[in-house]
Amino acid sequence: MSATGNLTVLAEAAWPEPGDGAPPPVPGYVHSSFPPLVAAVAERCLTRAYGRRPAPDGERTAIVLVSAAGDRASAAHVRATVAGGGRPGPLFFFQSVPNSVAGHVAARWGLGGPVLCLAPVGDPRAEGTAEVELLLHDGDADRALLVLIEQAPDDGVPGGAPATGAVAVLLGGGDAP
């Protein structure tokens, strides 16, 4: 555990870490590595914190997902499909909203806090951490899972670069156990 400002880092994880390949698929999500990457890094961080699923009873953990560009691959697919006169498949309706995968993580882990998505204009970690501090200060959550993710511009394109990666940090108040 370490402290950052008024917050305590309870667990931290990244994807990829040494030995990682592609993140495991997430049922109901297609075409893009964005949802699997968010789910994998969140799972790794929460497992390091709790060792099991679901989170302890009564856990009010918020999820703050921070991404400047969101799910580039899904957005590009929908844009190309519509421009070509096609109709995007129904999975892209909910998948195109980045907080849908954050909600998936919250449901899998039984987290009872708010789910927020931010598109930072400055330093993603600083902006996400500031939002976590507000949530904890206002009493909306006891802890928060901060997920930072950016995709390479050509992620999801056959032969394209893989997602650049993601980091998840479980944060509690400065007096967190």
Image (cartoon, grey):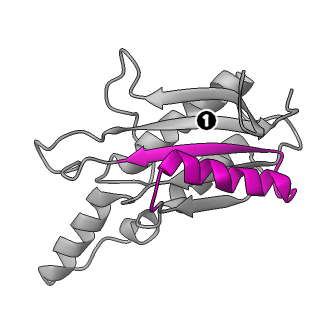
Residue drawn at x 37%, y 15% is 18
Relative vertical location of residue 77 with respect to residue 39 in this rendering, above or below: below
Q: Assess disc 1: are there few (<14), some (14-19) or many (≥20) residues with their C-alpha within 10 Å of its C-alpha.
A: many
Q: Is residue 104 visible?
A: no
Q: What is the magenta range?
A: 121-150
In reply to whether residue 127 is colored magenta, the answer given is yes
Residue drawn at x 30%, y 61% is 74
Residue 108 image position (x, y, % from top left):
65, 44
Relative vertical location of residue 116 with respect to residue 49 in this rendering, above or below: below
Residue 33 image position (x, y, % from top left):
33, 46
| Depth check, front residue: 76 or 118 | 118
Instruction: Describe the element under mark 1 as helix, strand or loop.
Output: strand
Residue 34 image position (x, y, % from top left):
38, 49
Left or right: 169 as drawn, with respect to 60: left
The N terminus - image quarter: top right
How many numbered marks does the figure carry? Answer: 1
Residue drawn at x 17%, y 72% is 80
Left or right: 24 as drawn, with respect to 82: right
The C terminus - image quarter: top right
Q: Is residue 112 visible?
A: yes
In reply to whether residue 113 is colored magenta, the answer given is no
Residue placed furthest toward the top: 19
Tag 1 residue: 169
Residue drawn at x 38%, y 33% is 23
Relative vertical location of residue 98 with respect to residue 174 in this rendering, above or below: below
| Depth check, front residue: 11 or 2 | 2
Residue placed furthest toward the bottom: 85
Q: Quadrant of residue 114?
A: bottom right
**Amino acid type of the residue tagged 1 in the rendering:** Val
Residue 168 image position (x, y, % from top left):
55, 37
